[in-house]
Each structure stands twice: as structure tokens, then as C-alpha cells.
Image (tube, helix red, strand yellow):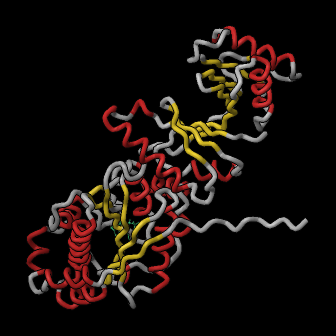
Amino acid sequence: MQYEHILIRYGELALKKRNRGEFETQLVRNIKKSLKAHPKVQVERVYGRMYLVLNGEPYEQVEAKLKKVFGIHSFSPTRFLQTFDLEAIQHAALEAVLDVDPAPRTFKAVVKRPNKQFPHRSQEMNHLIGGYILRNTDELKVDVHKPDVEVRVEIRVEGVFISCRTIRGMGGLPTGSSGKAMLMLSGGIDSPVAGWMTMKRGVRIEGVHFHSYPFTSERAKQKVIDLARILTQYSGGMKLHVVPFTEIQTQIRQHCPEHYTITIMRRFMMRITERLAQKHGALAIATGESLGQVASQTMESMYTINHVINTPVLRPVVAMDKEEIMTISRQIETYETSILPYEDCCTVFVPKSPVTRPKPEIAEEFERVLDVERLVEEAVAAVESIWIDPVAEEPEHQDFF
Ligand code: ATP
Ligand code: MG
């Protein structure tokens, strides 16, 4: 059966009244962006409802896109009848239930009737629809407690909506409804997950990646571009700022004690990211930092690194176990790219015994030999900013027969 409509639910109860209009506008914009390849789809907002009219665009492809739009809590392929004829409604309900795959064994009709002009009351309609389905099928039975499928019929002023399936969306808030953050994006498993979780709360992100060519290869950079591109499936596009980090790393290595090199390097990353945040209007920095995963991830280390900036740092994965992070990473499809074995600037010069309890005063002392301000400014000035478009569409399958 061809579905012409998709009903979108966006957990409006969770939204504050004041922001609701803004959220809805942003959600519509994001849905349109994610459906760019399907220009005939229309987004309609009628009586506080949001639904899509497909106008002949393929349902399955639109469904796959909608599953990746933040702010959609669930959606249903829906038949829309512009008639209030009882038999037409009954017949459409039957068709909808027959279309469910795998075929259900039990069902229940759930009728709502906000349109009080309609002559039959909800309870009566439950029976009229349930009875019709029972008469016209062999195997189906009614189960009002735990049915395999609920046949939902909503009789509204503008027409009748019929749906049997509810597909879970990603939840969260529409990207762009909560401001912007800079995501420190390495090639690892954690930071793409942190970026996705930040976006889930409605935050738009721009990536910042530190690249130490030729210590790290072009392929390592390409891997980060690929990760950013996977993330754009959820955001519709994103900027990635690639910061040349070779000079700073070389200076640190030449002039600072080995056990503090990682700490000092991280402090530089924070300073530069903060500058980029200011330049691009972001009010926070997001990282994939965690506690205790490796020896260098201690509270003291986080404190010493954080000490050089005033911008809030969001660390969405700090409370998660590695297993949990990996599960999300697989779900959002960054995992396979993250585990490709290209070197990262943090792994190029690994000190033999990095300090596990660094102190800000000591880091400052060691940084004194460096011209910190000049190094930061030069790095910021040499940033390469790339606009990353969402993953290219699969070419249309040609059928020659
Ligand atoms: P990830 O899996 O994200 O690489 P990690 O477990 O390897 O994280 P660290 O190496 O301690 O942890 O890095 C902590 C965070 O610092 C990263 O999650 C990322 O946000 C940031 N970071 C590390 N290296 C880079 C880099 N080269 N460019 C940008 N950000 C980086
Ligand atoms: Mg890493």
C-alpha cells in the first residue's frame, strides 16, 4: 500500500510553552534539509500537528532520513482520507492492518474523535472498525490488552488519519535550537559520540581538529573528515576547522620536560579551540574526555587542562563506560571509521611516563619558555576551515529490464 502521509510526533509535552514555536520552526527546517533529495515532500502544520505529504516520493527512503532527525520522537506512515464515509474509513483501516509486516495475529482499534460533528462516538467506532476487520480477515483476533498492532483512527476536522505502525525517532531536540559548540574532534571513538550527544540536545556543532603533518598523515586527516561527514547525517552539514599543530608540538617537545608534554599540548588545544569558539560565536566546547579510561585521564589532568580557558566544556561521555560509548558509536555508524588504525597527533610523541597528577602551576612554569600567545595566534591564523556536506546520495538504482 502506498502511504501518502507521515505523521510526526515531537514530544511537545517536554517543550516549554515559550520555546515551542521556535522548536517547531527549527524542526521543520531540519526535516526539509534532511529531505533535500526528495524535493516533492511537503511539511504541513495543521492544528498543532506536523505531517509530511510525500507527493509520490518513496516512503522507505524518507523513513530512513527521518530516523536521523533530532527532535522527532516517533512517526507513523499514515493514510489520510478526506471523506467521512463510514465504509471508506472501515476499508482503509482494513487495508492498513493487512499491510503490516510481519502479519499481526491480534489487533485493537483505537479511535479518537476530536471532530464532534462526526456522528459515531469513539467507543462505537472501535466496534464498527474492529468488527469490519474481523469479518474481512481469517486469522486476526482482537486483543485489547496486548495487541500485536493498534489500528489508530483519528477523526479530525480536516479528515481522517489512519495508522498502524509507529517508528521510533532519535528523540532529543532539533539541531540549532540550543546554540552552538565547538567539538574537539579526534579520530577516536569517543569524540564523535560526544559530538552526536551534544547535537542531540539541539546544539549545532563545528568540529576542530589538530593535525600535525607530516607527523600525522593526510590519511589521518581524511579519517576525521570522514567522521565529520558521518555526523552531518544528523545535522545536515557542518564546518570543520583543521588546525596545523606541528610547530606547537615541535616546540613543546624541544623545550618542555617530557612527562608534561601531553598536558601542555592539551592546554594549547584548549586555548586555540576557545579562540575559535569566540571567532565563530560558540558558547561552549565539547570533548570526548572521559575519566579513568587511560592513565592520563584523571581529575587532576582535566583540571590542569581546563585551567587555561573560561569557556564551559561539555563532556557528554564522562559518565559512560567504554562499552556504552562503543554501542552508541556503532548505532551512529562512526565506529568502523574510528577504529581505522591511523595515527593521531597525541600518539605520535607518547612520553615514557606521562604525569598522572599534573598541576596548573607546574604546567605554567614549564610553558614559560614558550611564546604561548604567538604560537596560539599563528595556529588560529593558519586554520583551514572546510564545509562538509552530508553523505552523498546513493546513486539511483537503474533498472534495465
Ligand atoms: P577520542 O576517542 O575522542 O580520541 P580518547 O579516549 O582518545 O578520545 P584523549 O586522547 O584523552 O581521549 O582525548 C580526549 C579528547 O580530546 C578527545 O575526545 C577529543 O575531544 C580531544 N582531542 C584529542 N586529540 C584531538 C585532536 N587531534 N584534535 C581535536 N581534538 C582532540
Ligand atoms: Mg583519541
Q: Pick the residue in front: 165 or 191.
A: 165
Q: Position of residue 53 (x, y in %)?
A: 63, 42
Q: From what the image shows, is residue 84 above or below residue 385?
A: above
Q: Pick the residue in front: 4 or 130.
A: 4
The quarter holding residue 185 reads bottom left
Q: From what the image shows, is residue 200 above or below residue 401?
A: above
Q: Residue at x 15, y 64 (%)?
A: 307
Q: Position of residue 160 (x, y in %)?
A: 66, 25
Q: Pick the residue in front: 285 or 325.
A: 285
Q: Assign ligand 1 to one image quadrant.
A: bottom left
Q: From what the image shows, is residue 284 above or below residue 133?
A: below
Can residue 136 be spotted in the picture? yes
Q: Residue at x 59, y 68 (%)?
A: 392
Residue 387 placement, left or right of 66: left
Q: From what the image shows, is residue 318 above or below residue 45?
A: below
Can residue 355 be spotted in the picture? no
Q: Position of residue 317 (x, y in %)?
A: 37, 54
